[in-house]
Image (cartoon, rainbow, N blue to C red):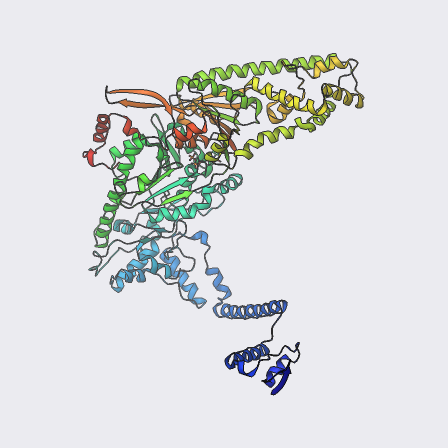
Amino acid sequence: MEACFEVEGQSGHFKCDQDLWSANSGGDSNAIILPEKKRNKKKGKSQVHELLKTKKNPKLTKSQKRKLKKIEEEKEKARLLSESIETLEKYKIQEDAYSLMWSSRNLGQVETVRERRRRVVQFSKVGLAVPHQPFKRKAAVCEIELDSDANHSVQELVENEFQQPVTADREVIASLPIPFGSSEGLVCSSGLGTVDEFGATLPVEEFTNKNSDTYMQEDSQDSPPTWRRINRSTDQADECPEMHISNTTNLADCPPQRVLFAPVVVHVSRPKELENKRKDLPIVMMEQEIMEAINENITVIICGETGCGKTTQVPQFLYEAGFGSGQSSVRRGIIGVTQPRRVAVLATAKRVAFELGFRLGKEVGFQVRHDRRIGDSCSIKFMTDGILLREVQSDFLLKKYSIIILDEAHERSLNTDILIGMLSRVIQQRQIIYDEQQHKIISGDRISPESMISPLKLVLMSATLRVEDFVSGTRIFRSPPPVIEVPTRQYPVTIHFSKRTEIVDYIGQAYKKVLSIHKRLPTGGILVFVTGQREVEYLCRLLRKASKELVEKSSNRNMEKEVSKASAGNAIEEYDMNEVNEAFEMHGNSHHDQTDRFSSYDEDLGDFDDNESDFSDDLGTDSDLEGIDDADLLNEETETNNDLSEVFGEGSLVSLKAAFEVLAGKTTSNPHSDEKQIVPSSPKGCSSQSIPCVEEKRNGANGLCAGAMCVLPLYAMLPASAQLRVFEEIKEGERLVVVATNVAETSLTIPGIKYVVDTGREKVKNYNSSNGMETYEIQWISKASAAQRAGRAGRTGPGHCYRLYSSSVFNNIFLDFSSAEISKIPVDGVVLLMKSIGVHKVISFSW
Ligand SMILES: Nc1ncnc2c1ncn2[C@@H]1O[C@H](COP(=O)(O)OP(=O)(O)OP(=O)(O)O)[C@@H](O)[C@H]1O
């Protein structure tokens, strides 16, 4: 279409496509009008094209688009559903086949040849093929040609030996079908305890030994695991053919490869309450990750915050995965756990036995220098590192262990350091011997079960480990072990630094701090760290004396109260007076305010790390209760009351109370005498009636004022029974105060400890090389130790750590880690010790 136009004296014409017009016919006639000479043909064409497109796909509104999308999605869903139903129909198994399925609870159980034959018949009845045995495929992976007989024999062996591992390539096995509910199909899973890095085929003798025994777990989920012996001689004696490998030409050349085992799961039934609590532990959420790392590596480092559950949970993970249980040939050995200190050994062994539902001394045992409680069926053994070191002397390969856990590896005691060096060799040696044995077995040699060696694994654990020492270089471990970090703890611990650092009388400071916590803060045990036995005993004496005085004072006060109550004819009923007090407290001196004031410590510092609290310290907002002794307490009370005076005016408190009493209709005949009785003047002349009541609430069960303290010592030389007293229950209404040296610094959970008072000092043995003398010196602890000490609070609930030193001392003077003991003792003693445990080339020992 062509049209002419004339605008303001200019004339021209334009062309317009019919379609173009029609496309715009419904619109506002915004046709493209261009003078012919300027018209861009190309542009015009594309615009037309676009318009045509728009016509074909008319522009949809947003809601239309949404609806369209929804319809499309629904269509897609319906299509998928019908496809799924079709597929399901196609692969649907017959009703009778369901009975052939096994519960996963039966995984790991033996199926005899007879049982298998029966299964074959049952499967064929319902028209199903018996699940494929993966052994042939595995052999193929290894490029081993077995003749049909041998193949058959081996296959039957696999059937008979439920734990029989088979050398196989992991990936290939992973793709193999898993037999119908049978554990004999070697399941490859990256999950818990199903794959082991090391091959450990059962010795030939074991296959042929008609009387060989194996252990099976009774199938019970509700009761603690029990073990039953199965005597093979009856059922399988005739059916267990001798292993018989012909054409093994390539076998010896085939390096021992990864071995897959039927998954071993040892069921543990814990009390429900405990199970629930356990679930909240951060490390429990990482169980799979940890077990995978342990399965796939010889050495693993676990760095987890204090209280995350390393000490108590990792041995349980291992136990549940078959370590130490006798169910798995390579994991049969005991789980050995070392602790640097005796008290930690006793306490953790007791706790783990309790959590697993075992009696201490049977499945879970311990050994310290003068005490040993280990049963024949021991699966987990706790011991000091000194004990394990002695065992290395008598059995370098530590054959009875399948895994060793060195807990608190950060301590760098001489024993720990030597142990780590020794164990790094032991695990290598065990691996070499094991590999050799595998080659021998594959090439048809016989190895007696007693001389069979399985690989040894090593786990290093700590909250404050200097990981670089172990992962950098190849001096200790040939390949750097993986490090698993558990970055959270269960409960928060608030750190409070002191404004000033008392250099000399830190015991006096600790004493004051304990008393102020006891008087002012809610219930919860207090753990105080000092340097040595003498300090422990001295502070215990002081605190016991103070406790006695407090109890006397409070009983005197109660007596006075009783007397005053009796003497007042129309004495105000306790209930009403409480109401009055509460009304007063509403105005500034309330319980809530008090609580807030205390909880503001948490708010100020609760989420801060140490550095942040340093920051607050530097700003002069130190939240610490430094120096809050009785006098400070009174000052604070005075300030509070002054505040109230400002609000109510001088003397109004007393008159207001009197007014309440009048309102309550309980006016005493002599308000002044009442005031004296009920509102006794403080030494500074302030009436602070409400304070004891506030304290009463803060102290909860502790009563009106701070009650008695149950003061207990804890140091290395204390007899074990006395050490364990700290774990016993205390009388109701008392507050537990434990005064300890650094024996309580690691691993311990003292139930109910909420407050830690850290003097920041420790007694250390130092060596003066110039005069050859060894001396004990008191020195600052390291930052790592300070973190460990703080970690003793907040284990059964949120906690507080009061550091009796300033943040600047902490930041500028404290070392990050304590120096290794070996660097502080004379070298001749170390050399002699090393020689005595059989290390002849001391110079090449890996430290
Ligand atoms: N005797 C006990 N009583 C009550 N709870 C306990 C006891 N022992 C351990 N627990 C609980 O288990 C948690 C984990 O303790 P565990 O000793 O395993 O931690 P951890 O990570 O090894 O700490 P640390 O690094 O300080 O040794 C504790 O925080 C506590 O909640």
**Residue 513 drawn at (x, y percent):** 51, 22
Residue at left 21%, top 26%?
Answer: 828
Instruction: Identify which residue, 737 or 110, lies in the foreground.
Output: 737
Query: Quadrant of residue 487 in the image?
Result: top left
Q: Check the picture and name the quadrant holding the C terminus.
A: top left
- Tell me where residue 449 appears, x and y as whole percent: 26, 45
- Residue 473 % position (x, y): 27, 43
* Furthest residue in direction left, as rendered: 841
**In the drawing, does residue 643 fall left or right of residue 232?**
right
Residue 456 vertical position relative to residue 109 in the rendered view, above or below: above
Residue extending furthest toward the front: 9
Q: Residue at x 45, y 56 (%)?
A: 102
Using the image as rendered, state which of residue 656 and residue 208 is in the foreground. 656
Q: Quadrant of the N terminus?
A: bottom right
Q: Is residue 566 above or below residue 165?
A: above
Q: Quadrant of residue 305?
A: top left
Examine the rendered structure and indicate whether residue 137 appears above or below residue 428.
Answer: below
- 834 vs 201, nearest the viewer: 834
Task: Name which quarter of the figure residue 368 lies in.
Answer: top left
Tally the marks.
0
- Residue at 38% in and 59% down: 116
- Above or below — where is 409 with respect to 205? above
* Residue 833 visible from this viewpoint: yes
Percent of width and height locating residue 12: 59, 84
Q: Is residue 338 visible?
A: no
